[in-house]
């Protein structure tokens, strides 16, 4: 490797893409193309970066398997940064195996971290933990150690484990200082700020208050029956009942919880659950069926009792009932929560992350675009969506991840 290539690679490792481009911008040999691609990715021009890396992989040829594998890993990182979560992971697995076979442990670890970050975005927390289990950050450069701890913190935040998240972020901050890369330090600072930002609203006895993540954790550990409208579950300290695929039951549970300790009239429940303008006898019969189903689901910690005018939620013992709602509730809030990270997402990636169909996701994006809430660029498969970060609150609880104990 010549001196200019070595200097450009060193500049990229320090997070200085302009310094790297000064050395290789006019060169078209394979190593220079690869470094130019990585530099353009660091500058945010993902389309140009992807083209340069693919050209570099072709220029290296079949004999330079390790160099081609590094190009694949770099392309996977670009796909992750541009939120193209449908990017073929088998190519990344093959590149990682090649790097391991040739003794390039650092880039092989980097490939594993890319896989773990993708799993984290998709809410696959168990898979992300298994990926991290095979990595020892103590023997890796400080930049990768920072990434490791950021993923650990992300898992802890999504599992609502505040103490573990703070410890991981403290370690990430120390590693970022050793790495001396400003972008990594900024990412750690952003994750730390999310811990102190409002994460949810608690609604109880007709009153509302904003909670930070540590307060949500304390609420989960209390004796309260919680109707969690961030994750569509009903829970107490020992049980978690998911109603994510039973929207009528969850609507009834939330309506009863918001009215607790009072009851809710039958007509009001019919209007909320079935969106009916008038509660005729057929709707009342359907309501009785759905209330029976809800009563069966909530049996471990609460009952749904009939009253002269409707139904009431009755927790076991002297437990309180709390509704945990999103900090800002609006149409398609889960889409906005993912877009609020400031990155550009594809509609297919959003559909993957939220477990919905791409046509459903496209309709949601079109509705948000019509309201000028989101913006896009590109056309067809290259189209990407984003929104300015919603100020003043964290999106941790809005991300698609099962809560602890689920």
Image (cartoon, helix red, strand yellow):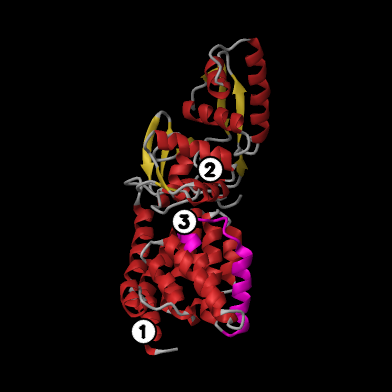
Of residues 261 and 13, the one nearer the viewer is 13
Q: Which mark is residue 231?
A: 2
Q: Which mark is residue 7?
A: 1
How many numbered circles does the render carry?
3
Q: Position of residue 206 (x, y in %)?
A: 41, 28
Q: SS of the residue at dot 2? A: loop
Q: Residue at x 57, y 62 (%)?
A: 128
Tell me the quarter of the picture where residue 98 sits: bottom right
**Res. 225 visible in picture:** no
N-term-proximal mark, 3 vs 2 = 3
Q: Is residue 237 magenta?
A: no
Image position of 221 (left or right of 405): left
Of residues 398 and 44, the one nearer the viewer is 44
Q: SS of the residue at dot 1? A: helix
Category of crowding for the residue at label 3, using alpha-carbon neighbours closer than 10 angstroms: few (below 14), some (14–19), many (at least 20): many
Image position of 118 (left or right of 10): right
In three-dimensional space, the C-alpha distance between marks 3 and 2, rounded to whole angstroms, equals: 14 Å
Of residues 351 and 153, the one nearer the viewer is 351
Image position of 370 (left or right of 318): left
Q: Position of residue 226 (x, y in %)?
A: 52, 39
* Residue picked out by circle 3: 157
Q: Which residues are magenta?
A: 78-103
Q: Position of residue 199 (x, y in %)?
A: 40, 47
N-term-proximal mark, 3 vs 1 = 1
Category of crowding for the residue at label 2, using alpha-carbon neighbours closer than 10 angstroms: few (below 14), some (14–19), many (at least 20): many
Rendered position, 32 above or below 243: below
Tell me the quarter of the picture where residue 17 sits: bottom left
Quarter of the figure that contains the N terminus: bottom left
Rendered position, 367 above or below 281: below
Of residues 292 and 364, the one nearer the viewer is 364
């Amino acid at each position: 490797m010549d001196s200019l290539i070595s200097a450009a690679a060193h500049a990229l490792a320090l997070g200085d893409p302009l310094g790297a481009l000064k050395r290789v911008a006019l060169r078209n040999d394979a190593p220079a193309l690869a470094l130019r691609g990585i530099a353009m990715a660091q500058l945010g021009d993902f389309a140009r970066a992807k083209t340069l890396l693919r050209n570099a992989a072709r220029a290296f040829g079949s004999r330079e398997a390790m160099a081609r594998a590094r190009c694949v890993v770099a392309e996977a990182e670009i796909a992750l940064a541009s939120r193209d979560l449908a990017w073929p992971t088998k190519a990344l697995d093959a590149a990682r195996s090649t790097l391991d076979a040739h003794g390039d442990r650092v880039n092989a670890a980097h490939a594993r971290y890319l896989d773990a970050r993708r799993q984290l975005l998709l809410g696959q927390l168990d898979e992300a933990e298994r990926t991290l289990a095979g990595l020892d950050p103590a023997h890796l450069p400080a930049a990768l150690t920072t990434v490791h701890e950021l993923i650990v913190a992300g898992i802890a935040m999504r599992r609502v484990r505040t103490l573990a998240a703070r410890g991981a972020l403290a370690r990430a901050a120390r590693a970022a200082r050793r790495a001396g890369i400003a972008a990594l330090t900024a990412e750690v600072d952003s994750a730390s700020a999310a811990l102190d930002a409002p994460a949810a609203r608690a609604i109880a006895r007709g009153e509302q208050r904003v909670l930070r993540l540590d307060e949500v954790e304390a609420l989960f550990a209390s004796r309260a029956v919680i109707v969690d409208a961030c994750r569509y579950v009903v829970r107490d300290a020992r049980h978690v009942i998911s109603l994510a695929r039973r929207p009528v039951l969850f609507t009834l549970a939330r309506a009863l919880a918001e009215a607790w300790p009072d009851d809710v009239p039958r007509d009001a429940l019919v209007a909320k659950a079935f969106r009916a303008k008038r509660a005729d006898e057929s709707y009342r019969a359907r309501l009785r069926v759905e209330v029976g189903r809800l009563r069966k689901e909530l049996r471990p910690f609460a009952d749904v009792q009939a009253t002269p005018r409707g139904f009431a939620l009755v927790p076991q013992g002297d437990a309180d009932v709390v509704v945990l709602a999103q900090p800002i509730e609006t149409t398609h809030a889960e889409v906005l929560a993912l877009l609020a990270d400031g990155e550009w997402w594809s509609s297919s990636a959003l559909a993957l992350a939220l477990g919905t169909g791409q046509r459903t996701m496209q309709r949601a994006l079109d509705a948000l675009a019509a309201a000028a809430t989101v913006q896009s660029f590109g056309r067809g498969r290259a189209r990407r969506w984003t929104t300015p970060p919603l100020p003043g609150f964290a999106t941790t609880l809005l991300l698609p991840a099962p809560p602890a104990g689920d």
